[in-house]
Amino acid sequence: MFTPRRRRFTLMPAVALASLSALIAIPALSQARLYAAAPLHVAHVTVRHGDNLWTIADRFTPASGNVQETVDQIEEANHLDGATVVPGQRLEVPR
């Protein structure tokens, strides 16, 4: 009498699937490019008597720009906790 052979589970389908996935993924991943941030251009300003952060930011904000955003950028670039500046203080103003 004929007894059917019991089939064994093999890893061959799993290996084939992993190889096929690698053949697709490696070329796609190798084309990824990393870009560095653009260099930050700054102007150096010395605070004069009567200046405050808003007037300095107003001088460097383009006509269509937002002065508050420029104030925020100046505070961040100079690690300021508030908008207080003193005469003689040097500030970096991002452009």
Image (cartoon, grey):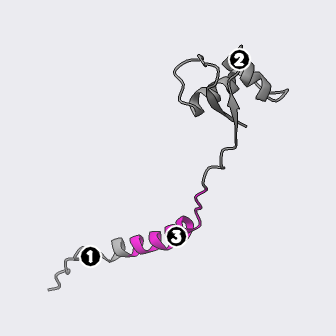
Name the residue tied to disc 3.
24
Tell me which label, 3 or 1, sits earlier in the chain.
Answer: 1
Amino acid type of the residue tagged 2 in the rendering: Asp
Residue 3 pos. (x, y %):
16, 81
Q: Please check the rendered image and state whether residue 18 is part of the magenta-colored stretch, yes or no.
A: yes
Quarter of the image for the C terminus: give it: top right
Name the residue rendered at 58%, 58% in the picture: 34
Amino acid type of the residue tagged 3 in the rendering: Ile
Q: Please check the rendered image and state whether residue 26 is part of the magenta-colored stretch, yes or no.
A: yes
| Viewer-closest of 32 and 93 | 93
Residue 89 pos. (x, y %):
61, 26
Secondary-structure class at tag 2 = loop
Secondary-structure class at tag 3 = helix
Q: Provide the residue span drawn in magenta.
A: 16-35
Name the residue rendered at 68%, 16% in the picture: 52
The answer to which quarter of the image holds residue 69 is: top right
Name the residue tied to disc 2.
51
Which one is closest to the eye, mark 3 or mark 1? 3
Name the residue tied to disc 1.
10
Can you say whether 16 is above or below 67 in the image?
below
Which one is closest to the eye, mark 2 or mark 1? 2
Marks 2 and 1, how far apart in space? Answer: 78 Å
Name the residue rendered at 71%, 21% in the picture: 48
Q: Residues within 10 Å of mark 1 (few under 14, many from 20)?
A: few
